């Protein structure tokens, strides 16, 4: 279970949003700018060269060089530069390409200096440009001060209702591991993800291909498939391998291919100005943290050590840049980045720190430690939590999704409750109290029960909250899927199930494929994964999947290894004592006889089950024929 890092588990700490590191970088940025403005102003006053004087105004404010001689052409070019400022900042945010805003500042200096190389300028244009700069800085400063004051007042209001509601969540208990069984409807959604996972390495049917820089990227879809199948395996079928394990390894291996990883070349080039394209070593937690979580879950679920072999994973950037790593090296670099970054938490996009990505990385490192019985992450837990609370949170205690590591500044109003829900799932693993507080706030402030429709609906959402992260469509299914997932993890099963029902019936109707598997029409693959975790999880199932894994006897005892995964749907595969095997199977197609293969039996030993007795082969395996017609429980035990 998640460790407790806070003494007061119920209220938002007073130190949230008061990080010294962010403050240092903000002041450093401001001081550097003031020095540049001073030098540029001095240059305007002292220089005799017209081009040089115009360039000085361009240093003070983007496009300022044009205003040295404010004729029609220069004013038009200045306006164009200002219009492009948010565009280039979006490019920086979207792909880590810091080169874009730099060029938008530097190029107008050069062009403005050339256009005005022979002019005589009104002296007061210095004051005009200084005024533009001062008004801009003052505008953002006033907004930030007002927002901070509002946040502090709202934090006090939240702290009034949090203690009782947080305590109620802490009183909930997990369902016993030996009593878990999945329903047929959810099995059909699992089947769909297994079908996606088992596709050939060049087959991208069913995936969303929009861009490889932001949230629609293929890597996130692949990782989410691994998380969902890993959760299914850990909670419901820990004594099952075969196609389930194969699907997980195939999506992990697929995530290493050039189609998925080539984006890092461009982010390194235009964000770091570097030709070192290794995606693991430095500032890329959106790969290292995410894939480590998939690797840790798989390794801990199965005991399969394939990803521990040195250099067994080849990340292909392009034909001439291929980088070999393994699960150990990925975890090593993840820990090293946390150790060396001034914020502790570190960037994914070059120069941009995302709090959700660092939570994913925390979960990945926790899963690694669980798989290898280590405690490396425990040495980092307190520091990561404190930095997230102080430097990556606002005064409300809400995690700021994004922050510039260079300037210490965030993007105001960047996202809302949906992003908070996205973070709340893994925040539980870092600190259970913080995760519970986050969910309780989301539940109390953004959900309302519609008595007429008999379902839950949302309030106070932004438009950005309704963006499907995987395909950028606007749909209320996006917050519904994320809230359903987090509600399930925190034990609010009624909320989760009603939101899922609303999605299936209204927001993204359930569709049936030719194989009988289910998916939701219009949802991206990534969002479908969040929704599937909501279907799979009950109280603290995700925490169990990451931090604990299956019971030991399930790894050592008999296994279900072979089955036609589209016709034999496995609702339960569990060994109670390491010698038996409990199965609950459904027919995926027509009722009839189907073959299953068992493994890890005692060679030559006799076993019995509902349809008779058998003797294990010399290699500890056996193929059985079973009659399936609806829910079919099968108990195999050694005689």
Image (cartoon, rainbow, N blue to C red):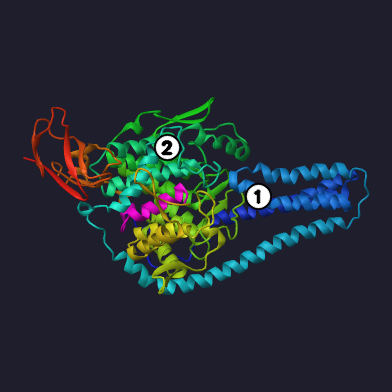
- The answer to whether one can see residue 6 in this image is no
Compared with 286, 320 (above or below) is above
> Is 569 within the magenta?
no
Residue located 40% across and 39% down the image: 331
Q: Percent from the top left, x then y, of residue 511?
A: 40, 51
- Residue at 79% x, 45% y is 108
The answer to which of 294 and 455 lies nearer the viewer is 455
Find residue 308 and report its horizontal and vertical position in percent.
34, 32
Q: In the image shown, does 374 or 175 lie closer to the viewer?
A: 175
Q: Image check: 436 left or right of 20?
A: left
Which quarter of the figure has residue 159? bottom left
Please determine whether, in this image, residue 564 is positioned above or below residue 380. Answer: above
Q: Residue at x 52, y 59 (%)?
A: 465
Tell me the SS state at disc 1.
Answer: helix
Give whichever of 507, 42 is nearer the camera.
507
Viewer-side label of 2, 1? 1
**Magenta highlight: main SS:** helix
Q: Which residues are magenta?
A: 523-542
Image x and y of residue 371, in percent: 31, 41
The tag on residue 133 is: none
Q: Quadrant of residue 151?
A: bottom right
Q: Which residue is mark 1?
A: 89
Q: Magenta includes 534?
A: yes
Instruction: Please identify the quarter of the rendering in which residue 597 is found.
Output: top left
Residue at disc 2, secondary structure: helix
Tell me if 278 is positioned left or right of 245 in this view: right
Instruction: Relative to 259, say whether 76 is above or below.
Output: below
Which residue lies under the disc numbered 2? Answer: 330
Q: Is residue 600 left or right of residue 246?
A: left
């Amino acid at each position: 279970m998640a460790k407790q890092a806070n003494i007061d588990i119920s209220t938002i700490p007073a130190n949230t949003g008061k990080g010294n590191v962010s403050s240092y970088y903000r002041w450093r940025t401001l001081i550097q700018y003031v020095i540049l403005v001073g030098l540029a102003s001095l240059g305007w006053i002292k220089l005799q060269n017209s081009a040089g004087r115009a360039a000085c105004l361009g240093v003070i404010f983007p496009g300022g060089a044009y205003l040295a001689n404010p004729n029609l052409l220069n004013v038009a070019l200045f306006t164009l530069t200002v219009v492009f400022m948010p565009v280039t900042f979006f490019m920086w945010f979207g792909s880590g390409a810091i080169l874009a805003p730099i060029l938008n500042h530097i190029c107008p200096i050069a062009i403005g200096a050339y256009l005005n190389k022979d002019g005589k300028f009104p002296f007061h244009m210095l004051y005009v440009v200084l005024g533009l700069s001062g008004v801009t800085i003052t505008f953002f400063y006033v907004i930030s001060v007002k927002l901070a004051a509002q946040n502090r007042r709202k934090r006090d209001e939240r702290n009034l209702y949090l203690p009782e509601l947080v305590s109620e969540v802490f009183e909930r208990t997990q369902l016993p591991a030996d009593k878990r069984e999945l329903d047929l409807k959810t099995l059909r959604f699992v089947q769909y993800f297994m079908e996606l996972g088992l596709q050939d390495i060049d087959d991208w049917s069913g995936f969303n291909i929009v861009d490889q820089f932001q949230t629609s990227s293929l890597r996130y879809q692949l990782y989410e498939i691994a998380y969902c199948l890993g959760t299914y395996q850990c909670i419901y079928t820990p004594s099952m391998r075969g196609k389930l394990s194969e699907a997980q390894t195939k999506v992990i291996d697929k995530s290493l291919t050039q189609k998925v990883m080539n984006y890092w070349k461009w982010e390194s080039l235009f964000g770091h100005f570097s030709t070192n394209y290794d995606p693991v070593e430095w500032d890329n937690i959106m790969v290292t943290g995410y894939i480590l979580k998939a690797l840790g879950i798989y390794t801990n679920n199965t005991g399969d050590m394939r990803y521990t072999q040195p250099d067994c994973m080849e990340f292909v950037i392009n034909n001439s840049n291929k980088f070999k790593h393994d699960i150990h090296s990925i975890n090593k670099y993840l820990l090293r980045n946390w150790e060396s970054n001034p914020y502790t938490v570190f960037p994914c996009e070059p120069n941009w720190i995302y709090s959700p990505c660092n939570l994913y990385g925390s979960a990945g490192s926790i899963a690694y430690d669980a798989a290898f019985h280590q405690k490396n992450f425990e040495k980092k837990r307190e520091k990561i939590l404190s930095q997230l609370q102080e430097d990556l949170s606002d005064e409300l205690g809400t995690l700021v999704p994004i922050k510039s590591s260079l300037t210490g500044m965030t993007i105001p109003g960047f996202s809302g409750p949906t992003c908070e829900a996205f973070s709340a799932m893994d925040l539980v693993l870092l600190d259970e109290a913080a995760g519970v507080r986050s969910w309780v706030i989301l539940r109390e402030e953004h959900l309302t029960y519609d008595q007429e429709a008999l379902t839950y609906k949302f309030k106070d959402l932004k438009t950005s909250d309704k963006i499907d992260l995987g395909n950028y469509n606007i749909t209320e299914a996006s917050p519904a899927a994320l809230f359903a997932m987090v509600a399930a993890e925190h034990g609010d099963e009624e909320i989760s199930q009603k939101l899922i029902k609303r999605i299936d019936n209204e927001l993204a109707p359930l569709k049936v494929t030719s194989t009988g598997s289910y998916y939701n029409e219009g949802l991206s693959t990534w969002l479908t994964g969040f929704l599937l975790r909501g279907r799979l999880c009950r109280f603290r199932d995700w925490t169990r999947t990451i931090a604990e894994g299956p019971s030991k006897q399930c790894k050592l005892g008999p296994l279900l290894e072979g089955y036609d995964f589209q016709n034999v749907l496995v609702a339960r595969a569990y060994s109670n004592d390491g010698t038996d095997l409990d199965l609950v199977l459904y027919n995926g197609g027509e009722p009839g006889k189907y073959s299953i293969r068992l493994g890890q039996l005692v060679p030559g030993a006799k076993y019995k089950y509902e349809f008779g007795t058998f003797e294990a082969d010399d290699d500890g395996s056996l193929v059985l024929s079973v009659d399936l017609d609806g829910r079919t429980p099968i108990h195999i035990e050694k005689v």
